[in-house]
Image: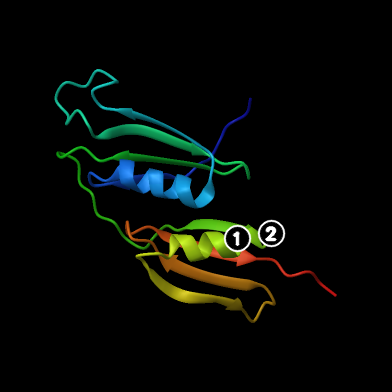
């Protein structure tokens, strides 16, 4: 197997809730392990050290709770991008925006595709692009 590149999102204590939310939105199998399960006695037992969501569409999303002694500064320098021809992306956009903020409504853009962006209720930026069939 070759190398993989997957987004791994950092959370400040709510990784479990966030990853369960993403599983509910995107579907798939979610694996989670706490710091305690990995043998880290000095971290809160219920905090997530490693989680991986693998969806039926082939997406892989990872997440973890940042340890207290590590800096955690959420920002807008990274976004999770969902793109393709599948109209199901429209449903993902709608469900991800629940409790969040739509920063660009999902609508036809100057390049011909439907696109939009949002910040979900966990502070993660998402971009969605639905490729339109050329006629």
Residue positioned most to the top:
39
Residue 16: x and y in percent read: 32, 41
- Which of the two residues, 94 or 58, is positioned nearer the viewer here? 94
The part of the image, by quadrant, that contains residue 76 is bottom left
Residue bearing the label numbered 1: 89
Q: Left or right of 102: which side holds 27?
A: right
- Which of the two residues, 80 or 78, is positioned nearer the viewer here? 80
Residue 29: x and y in percent read: 51, 35
Judge whether 48 appears above or below 38 on screen.
Answer: below
Judge whether 97 appears above or below 3 on screen.
Answer: below
Residue positioned most to the bottom:
110
The residue depicted at 62 percent of the width and 29 percent of the height is 2
Judge whether 80 appears above or below 38 on screen.
Answer: below
Circle 2 crowding by C-alpha within 10 Å: few under 14, some 14–19, many from 20: few
Residue 93: x and y in percent read: 51, 64
Pick the quarter of the image with the C terminus: bottom right
The residue depicted at 19 percent of the width and 28 percent of the height is 45
The residue depicted at 29 percent of the width and 20 percent of the height is 38
Q: Which mark is residue 86?
A: 2
Label 1 SS: helix
Q: Which mark is residue 112?
A: none
Q: Left or right of 22: which side holds 121?
A: left
State how far apart marks 1 and 2 are (Cα).
6 Å
- Which of the two residues, 43 or 30, is positioned nearer the viewer here? 30
The residue depicted at 14 percent of the width and 39 percent of the height is 69
Q: Are marks 1 and 2 in contact (CB under 8 Å)?
A: yes
Circle 1 crowding by C-alpha within 10 Å: few under 14, some 14–19, many from 20: some
């Amino acid at each position: 197997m070759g190398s993989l590149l997957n987004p791994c999102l950092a959370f400040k204590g709510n990784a479990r809730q966030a990853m369960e939310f993403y599983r509910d939105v995107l579907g798939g199998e979610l694996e989670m392990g706490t710091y305690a399960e990995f043998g880290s006695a000095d971290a809160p037992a219920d905090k997530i050290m490693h989680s991986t969501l693998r969806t039926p569409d082939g997406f892989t999303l990872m997440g973890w709770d940042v340890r207290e002694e590590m800096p955690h500064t959420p920002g807008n320098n990274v976004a999770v991008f969902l793109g393709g021809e599948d109209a199901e992306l429209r449903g993902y956009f709608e469900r991800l925006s629940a409790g969040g903020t739509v920063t660009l409504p999902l609508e036809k853009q100057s390049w011909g595709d439907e696109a939009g962006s949002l910040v979900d209720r966990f502070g993660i930026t998402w971009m969605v692009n639905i490729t339109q069939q050329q006629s």
